[in-house]
Image (cartoon, grey):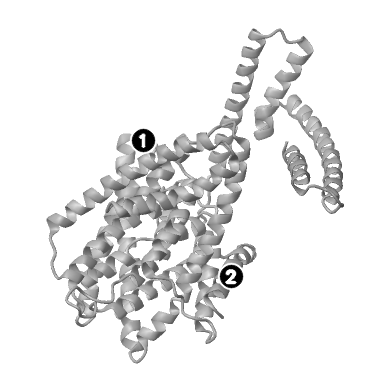
Amino acid sequence: MDQLTLLFALLLGAVVSVPVGERLGLPAPVLMTVLGAVLALLEFVPNVDVPPDLILPLLLPPLLYAAVRRTSWRQFAANVRPILLLAVALVFVTTLCVAVVAHAIVPGLPLAAAVALGALVAPPDPVAATAVAGKLGLPRRLVSILEGEGLFNDVTAIVLYNVAIAAAVSGSFSAWEAGLDLVLSAVVAVAVGLALGWGANKLMDFLGDATLQIGLSLLVPYASYVAAEELHGSGVLAVLTTALFLVEYATDADDVMTRLAGHTFWDIVDTLVTGVAFGLVGLELHNAVRTAAGHWGELLTWAVVIVGVVVLVRLLWLLPATWLTKRLHAARDTAEEIPVSWRETVVMWWAGMRGVASAALALAVPLETDAGGDFPGRGEIVFIAFGVIMATLLVQGLSLPWLVGRLGVRADSGREKQFEHDLAVRAARAAKHRLREIEEAEDLPEELSEQMLRSAFDIGVRISPDIADDERREAHRQRARRLKRVRAIQREMLSAARHEVLAARSEAGADPEVVDRVLRHLDVRSLR
């Protein structure tokens, strides 16, 4: 098997793992990690030959961009306090605790190298958090905090990692320079992200065509990441800033085709890249086995200890942090979304899985120092990091669905239904208001005006039937049944038309481009 065949195997696994995971009740990323680990144990499967410094730039930008599309800036702003407690403060604390313990138990491991180990295992993976927790029917407030933590903790961890690596390679460290680098990195990243977000927004208006706009949306996160890194900023923060800007300002309510096609496109990208990323994590078992040859006992012991530190620190931090956030929340009466019970806090604790970022950072540890010697403890760092990733992904990832069910943590369906109801009312009112404006500007026939008024009301009723009274609800049900039958007949008619047009593609003298253009027209008509 060569590298290209291995890539295709991972892509196929990424597609198949989704329905298999749904049937087994297991997260697809966890199944892909298991698949990668199994492939790594097969003799005919080659080692992954991807330069470590390319893993983050290739995988993180599209994954972060896809994750941000599911949220909004206002959601982050509403949860800034708990997100900062987890994405910044907890990353610092975890890094410090892991560094102290690793420096103490691993013989000959310098403090700078231990800090690098702490930084690379500190951040829970944003893809794992959203892919695993988001599929379990958790309360939206928990998913929002986990998404926010996962998206922003990489920024903190990567900066800490770079500072520690620089200190280990050069043999010198300056706290002042490190702090200044952290601030400058964030400022540069935000500036680059906003500039590219604004530019991409203007360029999308210029392109107009949905295909070109979606193609540009794939290039933008990579451009943002690379530009920020070239200017010594945080590529991760730049991608987040660009994505949040575009989500907030680049949405045209009437651009239906771009929105539908873009949603489908990014679902595909998210599925494939996530699968490949976690498959690569599993394939790193090659490196772990090679590193452990001859001293399995010591390395396994160190890995187990660090796993314990990582998991325990998160729990010990979450308990007081959640209590403090609740107190501040009650005092300020904000719209902040926080865990409301110990059960939700336990779920947040157990959802702290490590993944792609940790694996990429471990592989990116330099081979040599500036003095020409081997990087101290590189093999031990890679093995321990792999142990933390596999333990948290497999143990926590596989048991999280069971834990959620056991604790009975579920989304507040009543609250979601009420919000849906309120949106339906607002949509219907907006439609009626626009109808009144049209009636004032034009002299509509009374019959047409009444028909349009019913249509405006139906817009809301179709979203949430509860907004209608019993009589209107029953009338709506009858109209819905008739409309369903009409649409079923229309689908059969359009299907016959599509089959006829598609058959013409094989006829002598037929122009395929004309056939495809007519077929596209029928396809769009089918969406109405």
Q: Position of residue 221 (x, y in %)?
A: 43, 50
Query: At x 53% / y 64%, what residue is drawn?
Result: 275
Q: Kindly tell me whether residue 475 is visible in this rendering.
A: yes
Quadrant location of the N terminus? bottom right
Query: At x 12% / y 60%, what residue is drawn?
Result: 174
What residue would you read off at disc 1? 334
What residue would you read off at disc 2? 8
Residue 28 image-quadrant placement: bottom right
Query: At x 51% / y 70%, what residue is drawn?
Result: 279
Q: Nearer the viewer, residue 110 or 102?
A: 110
Q: Nearer the viewer, residue 463 or 273?
A: 273
- Taking 63 as reference, is 480 above or below it? above
Query: At x 33% / y 90%, what residue is drawn?
Result: 295
Q: Nearer the viewer, residue 499 or 363?
A: 499
Q: Earlier in the sequence, mark 2 or mark 1?
A: 2
Quadrant location of the C terminus? top right
Secondary structure beneath dot 1 equals loop
Secondary structure beneath dot 2 equals helix
Q: Position of residue 11 (x, y in %)?
A: 58, 66
**Label 2 CA crowd tier, 10 Å (few <14, some 14–19, many 20+):** few
Q: Is residue 122 left or right of residue 204?
A: left
Q: Position of residue 218 (x, y in %)?
A: 50, 50
